[in-house]
Image: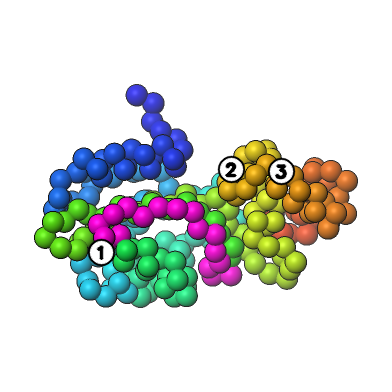
Amino acid sequence: MRRPETFKQISRLLMDSWISSPAGLADPKAYMAPCMECSGPTWCDTRSENPEEFHVDFVKDYTLPTGLTDMSLLQRSGLFADFPDQHHLQRIVVPAYADAVERQRPVMGRIVTRTLDMRVAYDRIILPQKNSAGRSSWCIGLLDIRFLLPMGSRTDGLDDPDLGIVQLLVEGASTREIADVMSLSARAIEHRIERLKSAFGARNIAHLVGLSISAGISGIGKRVD
């Protein structure tokens, strides 16, 4: 059987495994298999009553096609309280895990936010232990980062969707592919591209890509220490 390649396919397999798993399963590895070959699967010990004391282990590091950003700060195993961006943790991460643990129901969705001076969009699924005796004692999680861009003065005047579109154009994505990633209509993407071309003074998309690279907005050619 061909190994699933997309986040959607892997999420579906994980969900199927979760649905069929017994209550009180002590070891989540039994149904983590579908995500073991992809980037960023995590296992989180949620036994503490205090979410800041949840402990997360990164089973496998994230990988990004752009290689623009050093991800090491975002994927260090340890307590939630040790995460370097506590604002992001308290606003985005803790509520999702607390909800999954208390309700023992999966949490999934697309997140567009900012963390550690970067703009990021990612799809997320969190699957908690089913535990008839009380709260879930662990969760597994999986992220699919759609774009990750450094913030700075060169991005002034561009919102998150604009920056995502620029990055995806640099990576060779089509209008329809960008629309899917950004959860916008193809027409909305076309409109934004025209606005970007006007803002950059670009004659066409290839010119826009070149100008964005020259301006450093896409991050191509930037050294990552």
Is residue 200 positioned above or below 181 on the image?
below
Q: Mark 1 — residue?
A: 102
In depth, the one of 144 and 70 nearer the eye is: 144
Q: At which x and y percent is residue 113?
A: 54, 64
The kind of secondary structure element at disc 3 is helix
The kind of secondary structure element at disc 1 is helix
Read off the magenta span.
Answer: 100-117
| Magenta region includes residue 27 | no
In depth, the one of 92 and 152 nearer the eye is: 92
Q: At which x and y percent is residue 46?
A: 25, 65
Is residue 26 positioned above or below 137 on the image?
above
Label 3 amino acid?
Arg
Which residue is drawn at the image coordinates 80% and 49% (left, top)?
Answer: 194
Whether label 2 touches label 1, CB < 8 Å? no
Q: Earlier in the sequence, mark 2 or mark 3?
A: 2
Crowd band around label 2 with a 10 angstrom C-alpha radius: few (<14), some (14–19), many (20+): few
In depth, the one of 127 and 213 nearer the eye is: 127
Q: Earlier in the sequence, mark 3 or mark 1?
A: 1
Q: Quadrant of residue 177?
A: top right
